């Protein structure tokens, strides 16, 4: 039988992490959630008129999408205890500066990585649910990029929804699949990811097995490595040459990198270096697309302040449970009842049961 080549978003249930950094006080770790807004604030205060010019430049970097208008009222109910839910997409667009970062001859863009970040009421602990990119889903009727109506479709790959119809339809697809209302939408592209890593000086990751670099990819021995932006991009996109070569296995690497990235940011004193804070903020905002409710530095700052109580070190990472499709073993489908249990916990702001964290399809990783 053909070895499954299925895709997974970012975060599964393998909790391998990079080499642990020295203990950092919780108050400093919490800065991970607000470094952009506060770092920009330092620049503005320190720079006076020049700071205002820098602020305006960063503010104009951010692109906004009116998700509410595009979707309308056909959405799940917003429950009073549902906390905040954010759909985060990593776009594999080859447009502009992204073209030089990937040799694949693919037009358009897909949601190469998809995460639903759930922030419970009280803002104390976050949960990140990754949606496998090759999951076969039912796409609802949507408004397309040009405003025209796009008919619903069954058994389409999840990552094709973004490329064919756009971000608003991706949000609507996730909401229909999960029954969870998305409060916000955030998208970052290839170039922004690379520049963010370079701006913080690289990220250290630890591998328990090598990446052999097939198909022009990254080649790394088992052990600890310091990766720059370009290497980090290859790392999180590696599929062939690691584990069983499936896209589901790629989640393991993306989890490792997410943990390592958060560890790197939390041990850096970005607030003590306005110039570095500005470089990081500039690289990130240039590549950000958000819903219109977050599409300014002021709104991002307000949202960041609401997250002050969260320690990213406690963030739980889960892969949406999937099983191999019986018709096409190269694709996966939502696994039941596990997925329903997972989304119910997110909707009701309840702890995710252990049974909802287990995916029948694992990509060769337990």
Image (cartoon, rainbow, N blue to C red):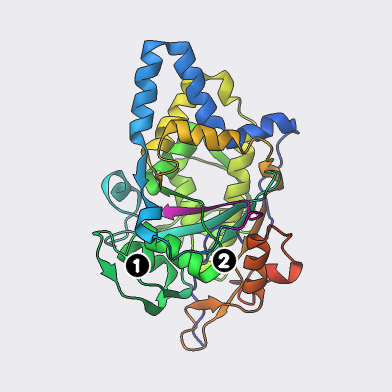
Nearest the viewer among 204 and 59 is 59
Nearest the viewer among 146 and 100 is 146
Q: Residue at x 36, y 50 (%)?
A: 66
Q: Residue at x 51, y 56 (%)?
A: 182
* Residue at numbered disc 2: 249
Q: Secondary structure at mark 2?
A: helix
Find residue 146 and report its image quarter: bottom left
Whether residue 302 appears in magenta in the rendering, the answer is: no
Direction from residue 5 to residue 25 in the image, left or right: right
**Disc 2 packing (10 Å; few <14; some 14–19; many ≥20):** many
Find residue 351 and report its image quarter: bottom right
Position of the C terminus, as image quadrant, is bottom right
As measured in the structure, the alpha-carbon distance from the residue carrying label 1 to the one carrying label 2 is: 31 Å
Place of residue 4 in the rendered image (x, y in percent of width and height, measured from the top left): 51, 78
**Disc 1 packing (10 Å; few <14; some 14–19; many ≥20):** many
- 196 is higher (above) or lower (below) than 15: above
Q: In terms of sequence position, does the residue under pointer 1 or pointer 2 come before the other?
A: 1
Place of residue 209 in the rendered image (x, y in percent of width and height, measured from the top left): 63, 59
Direction from residue 180 to residue 218 in the image, left or right: left
* Residue at numbered disc 1: 142
Find residue 63 and report its image quarter: top left
What residue span does the magenta drawing correspond to? 79-90
Place of residue 343 in the rendered image (x, y in percent of width and height, measured from the top left): 62, 66
Q: Residue at x 41, y 66 (%)?
A: 159
């Amino acid at each position: 039988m053909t070895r499954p080549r299925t895709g997974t978003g970012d975060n599964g249930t393998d909790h391998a992490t990079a080499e642990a950094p020295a203990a950092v006080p919780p108050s400093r770790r919490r800065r991970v959630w607000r470094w952009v807004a506060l770092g920009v604030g330092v620049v503005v205060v320190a720079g006076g008129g020049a700071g205002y010019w820098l602020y305006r430049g960063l503010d104009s970097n951010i692109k906004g999408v009116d998700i509410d208008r595009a979707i309308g009222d056909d959405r799940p109910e917003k429950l009073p205890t549902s906390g905040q839910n954010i759909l985060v997409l990593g776009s594999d667009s080859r447009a502009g500066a992204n073209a030089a970062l990937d040799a694949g001859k693919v037009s358009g863009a897909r949601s190469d990585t998809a995460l639903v970040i759930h922030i419970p009421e009280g803002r104390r602990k976050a949960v990140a649910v990754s949606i496998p990119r090759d999951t076969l889903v039912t796409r609802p009727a949507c408004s397309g990029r040009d405003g025209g109506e796009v008919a619903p479709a069954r058994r389409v790959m999840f990552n094709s929804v973004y490329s064919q119809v756009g971000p608003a339809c991706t949000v609507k697809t996730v909401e229909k699949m999960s029954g969870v209302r998305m409060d916000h939408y955030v998208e970052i592209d290839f170039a922004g990811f690379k520049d963010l890593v370079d701006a913080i000086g690289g990220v250290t990751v630890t591998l328990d097995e090598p990446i052999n670099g097939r198909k022009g990819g990254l080649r790394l021995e088992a052990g600890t490595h310091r990766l720059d932006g370009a290497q980090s991009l290859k790392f999180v996109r590696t599929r062939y040459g690691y584990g069983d070569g499936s896209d589901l296995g790629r989640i393991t690497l993306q989890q490792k990198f997410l943990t390592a990235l958060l560890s790197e940011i939390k041990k850096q004193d970005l607030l003590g270096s306005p110039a570095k804070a500005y470089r990081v903020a500039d690289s990130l905002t240039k590549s950000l697309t958000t819903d219109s409710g977050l599409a300014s530095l002021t709104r991002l700052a307000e949202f960041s302040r609401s997250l002050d109580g969260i320690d990213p070190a406690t963030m739980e990472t889960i892969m949406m449970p999937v099983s191999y499709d019986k018709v096409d073993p190269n694709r996966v489908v939502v696994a039941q009842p596990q997925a329903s249990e997972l989304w119910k916990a997110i909707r009701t702001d309840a702890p995710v049961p252990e049974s909802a964290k287990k995916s029948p399809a694992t990509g060769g990783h337990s």
